[in-house]
Image (cartoon, rainbow, N blue to C red):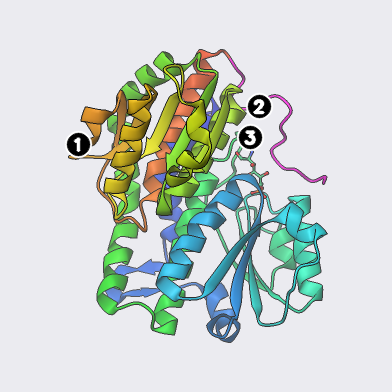
Amino acid sequence: EKGGYDHFMLKEIFEQPTTIADSLRGRLVLNEQKIILSGVDAIQDKLANARRIIIVACGTSWHAGLVAEYVIEELCRVNVEVEYASEFRYRNPVISSDDVIIAISQSGETADTLVALERAKEQGATIFGIVNVVGSSIARISHAGCYTHAGPEIGVASTKAYTAQLAVLMLFALKLAKAKGTISDERFNELCQELNDIPEKVQWVLENEVDNIKAIAYKYKDARDVLYLGRGYNFPTALEGALKLKEISYIHAEGYPAAEMKHGPIALVDEELPVVFIASKDAYHEKIVSNIQEIKARKGMVISVMTQGDEVTPTISNDVMVVPEADEVIAPLLTVVPLQLLSYYIGVYRGLDVDKPRNLAKSVTVE
Ligand code: M6R
């Protein structure tokens, strides 16, 4: 049932070219330059007139929501807020019938997310669910939605569900932007093409980078703490990389926006601290390069996720993990993959049960 892989987590990481393609299939219609999402059509007026979009989720699904905040604000010019479901449900948030809530959940059974949605629904908000498990509680409570087609995810650490969520959120953002007229035809077509190309780029990482990442994992497996830094679209990738490492290897890890480092965490940096930078080519690349230099100046060890062909990043990093070039908006679907593999191999080298980390449940149905 593990399809020849040692663990479900590894199988699920390797399934991503397929599960991303499955989540796009029949929805991204390249030759007609359109996106078909009947759930979006069902609440089209609500979405077009939404005062804001509030994304509610937990854990890795919350990280997908953070990526979506950057993408939807950029492409659709609407205010987006991302909330931890557990906080949202217990405070007294101001919600109205002009708000659209996007709920993101792999299992569709996360108690905190479900209760937050019940509250928001009572107050008149429209709920759009992005869920993996068909017929689950969150799918049923939503007014409309769109399933991710990741297939069953068995490993406790979410991998393929995350990239499927990102794929659907990208479709959502592109479709809404087109409907609102906030994206040019040219940019729409360009991003659709980029999205379409993502499965084969993920496949490239899986075919070309695994041995390198294994060696890096072995080198850093005894680290006590690891810092993950990214900016812009890849700030959430830093958070997700750190969460994966914590869950799978029990190494303390933190994700931060790279520029926040100088406001505190830089005090942690010494020759013992590995710092993972998500340094793929984007509008912030020069800024990331100077953040890497700040870490090197303090003798930190730098591991960078970088774009193929980048000649600068290897000269200032101790180790690099390479991804193919991708548009910055779409890149989070790709840059997370080396980080999933890094966590997996560190967990394996530490002799841990990567599919069932201690204290964790696949679906958190209690608060
Ligand atoms: O099923 P959900 O997407 O609602 O689950 C949310 C979190 O519990 C989940 O993402 C958790 O953080 C994972 N263990 C992350 O790998």
Q: Nearer the viewer, residue 7 or 244?
A: 244
For the residue marked with disc 2, what is the amino acid? Lys
Q: Report crowding for label 1: few under 14, some 14 to 19, many 20 or more residues within 10 A (C-alpha).
A: few
The correct choice, above or below, for 284 with respect to 116 in the image is above
Residue 113 in the image: x percent, y percent? 73, 56
Count residues near mark 3 (Cα–Cα under 10 Å), then give few for <14, some for 14-19, many for 20+.
Answer: some
Sequence-wise first label, 2 or 1: 1
Q: What secondary structure is marked by label 1? A: loop
- The spot of residue 97 in percent (x, y) is 71, 82
Q: Is residue 256 left or right of residue 364?
A: left
Dominant secondary structure, magenta: loop
Which kind of residue does numbered mark 1 sit on?
Answer: Val
Q: Which percent across, then down, holds residue 266?
A: 47, 33
Distance Cα–Cα, label 1 vs label 3 = 37 Å
* Picture quadrant where residue 213 is located: top left
Task: Indicate whether 317 appears above or below 15.
Answer: above
| Residue located at (63% from left, 45% from top) | 59
Q: Quadrant of the N terminus?
A: top right
Q: Which residue is mark 2?
A: 356
Q: Which residues are magenta?
A: 352-367
Disc 2 is placed on an element classified as loop
